[in-house]
Amino acid sequence: MWNAILTGVVLTTSGVFVGGLIMVAAAVVPAFRAVPCGTYVWMHQRLDHYIERYMPFTAGLTILTGLILSCQDLAPGTRALNLVGVGLTVTVSAISQFGNVPLNKRVKAWSPEAPPPFLEKTRLLLRWRRLHLARVAAGVPALLAFTVAALWR
């Protein structure tokens, strides 16, 4: 029974987490690129404030639940898949903490009324986008690993 509950939790939290990453890549980043610099700064500051409320929590709960499942699962294949999912989710979190979060702090220091020069915004956004796509590239296989592990149980 506990394995079923934990499996539901890991699939839900990783699904919400990866869905958020994909939505940002598919909709938010193109919107950032399409608007004037001051609007970009305002949007980034507002969105980051709300996204920070749930993304770290869902990543942490995914990691914790995946580790518990890995310890409880006796089948080596599903244990390995859960550990792969955990490792990839940790990778997403590390990219966030050491890559995107420092860039977000720079954007928080900017004023929408007196935005930075266009070139500075463009360079930062390009770097932020590359880091974000790396998060997506790690997050999607993490969700797939958890899903396949759940199906094999």
Image: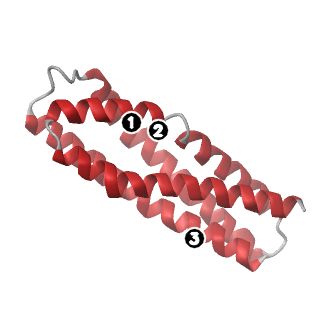
Q: What amino acid is at disc 1?
A: Leu
- Tag 3 or tag 1, which sits nearer the N-term? 1
Circles 1 and 3, Cβ within 8 Å, touching? The answer is no
Give the class, few, some or many, for how many residues have Cα within 10 Å of label 2's Cα (few <14, many ≥20): few
Q: Which residue is mark 1?
A: 47
Distance Cα–Cα, label 1 vs label 3: 27 Å
In the image: residue 52, left or right of residue 149: left
Q: Please give the label number shown on residue 144.
A: 3
Tell me which residue sits at (21%, 24%) in the image. Answer: 112
134 in relation to 52, above or below: below
Give the class, few, some or many, for how many residues have Cα within 10 Å of label 1's Cα (few <14, many ≥20): few
Q: What amino acid is at disc 2?
A: Ile
Using the image as rendered, state which of residue 43 and residue 98 is in the foreground.
43
Circles 1 and 2, Cβ within 8 Å, touching? The answer is yes
Element under disc 1: helix
Quadrant containing the C terminus is bottom right
Tell me which residue sits at (69%, 57%) in the image. Answer: 10
Image position, residue 40 (x, y; %): 22, 36
Element under disc 3: helix
